[in-house]
Amino acid sequence: MTATVAVIPAAGRGTRMRPATRIVPKALVTVVDRPAVQYVVEEAVRGGADEVIMVVDLDAGHLVQQHFLMEGRLPGLEDIKIRVVVQEEPLGLGHAVWEAAEAVRDRSFFCLLADNIVRPGGDVLPALAAASQGNSAVCLRRLTDEFLSKYGVVVPGSDVVDRTLDVIGAVEKPGPEHAPSDLGLIGRYLFTPEIFEVLAKLPPGHGGEIQLTDAIDRLASSGKCRGYVAEEDLLDVGTPRGLVEATWVLGRSQFPDLE
């Protein structure tokens, strides 16, 4: 299964990046020569998407919209349909994805978090599509104990074979004492439209927010989720340290003579 539409939640307030994000939306923080979210849109297009739905916040979303939709479309994105959906309240990642339901309708879709950028040559969307077997699929990385309280973690339902496995559950930020595995969710997904039905009925979870991990748990427990274990971490541009690393890695890919 694959998808031609991608949802990019980009409504985060960027509290980990203050004061840089007091005015500038987190999604528009520059990495080398373009906003972080543009890298993610370009990744979605490489994965086969010809339509991108951006979920933005009420205050600064118009700036994200202006970047992509102003006159003189961005090179390489001229033929891509980009739509903007506003998340009026910050009720969690799951709620942000649910806001795209009307625009996505009954289609399967990629979901890419704007905080994370793939390393050059490290695209995972084609592998997610291959691993899905007609179900939803999630991208995973093996985590050390220190990160098990920072990411959602899945419950494996089978051994990992050729980097793929069945997923039968998921827990949001369980910590090392309660983590069901070391396989963490890292911000790339392929969902069937069934995810919207789950999100619509989901109560608040960890932190009082509608958690996407909880919706994945519901799908997985009904046998409708697969996993793909990626070889490399994504670049986290949601923290100052991560932004510096991403700028260095992506800068060197564009300017190989940098020391």
Image: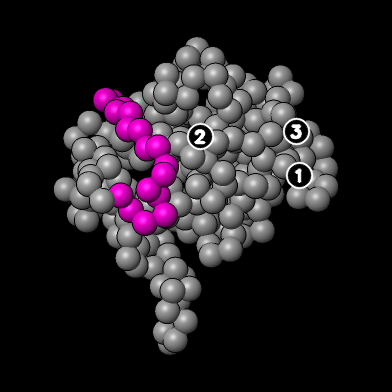
Q: Say which of marks 1 and 3 sits in front.
A: 3
Which of pointers 1 and 2 lies earlier in the amino acid sequence?
2
Amino acid type, mark 2: Val
Q: Within the magenta stretch, is there residue 75?
A: yes
Q: Say which of marks 1 and 2 sits in front.
A: 2
C-alpha separation, residue under disc 3 versus residue under disc 2: 18 Å
Residue 53 position within the rendered picture, expressed as x and y whole percent measured from the top left: 40, 34
Amino acid type, mark 1: Thr
Query: Relative to 234, is 9 on the left or the right?
Result: left
Q: Residue at x 32, y 65 (%)?
A: 33
Secondary element under disc 2, as helix, strand or loop, is strand
Secondary element under disc 1, as helix, strand or loop, is strand
The circle drawn on residue 133 is 3
Front residue of 87 and 110: 110
Front residue of 67 and 75: 75
Residue 80 position within the rendered picture, expressed as x and y whole percent measured from the top left: 42, 42
Amino acid type, mark 3: Gln
Residue 205 position within the rendered picture, expressed as x and y whole percent measured from the top left: 47, 24
> Which residue range is magenta in the image?
73-90
Q: Within the magenta stretch, is there residue 48?
A: no
Q: Which residue is drawn at 54% across and 19% down?
A: 106
| Predominant secondary structure, magenta span | loop
Q: Quadrant of the C terminus?
A: bottom left
The circle drawn on residue 164 is 1
Residue on which the image places disc 2 = 5
Which of pointers 3 and 2 lies earlier in the amino acid sequence?
2
Q: How crowded is mark 3: few (under 14 residues within 10 Å), some or many (20 or more)?
A: some
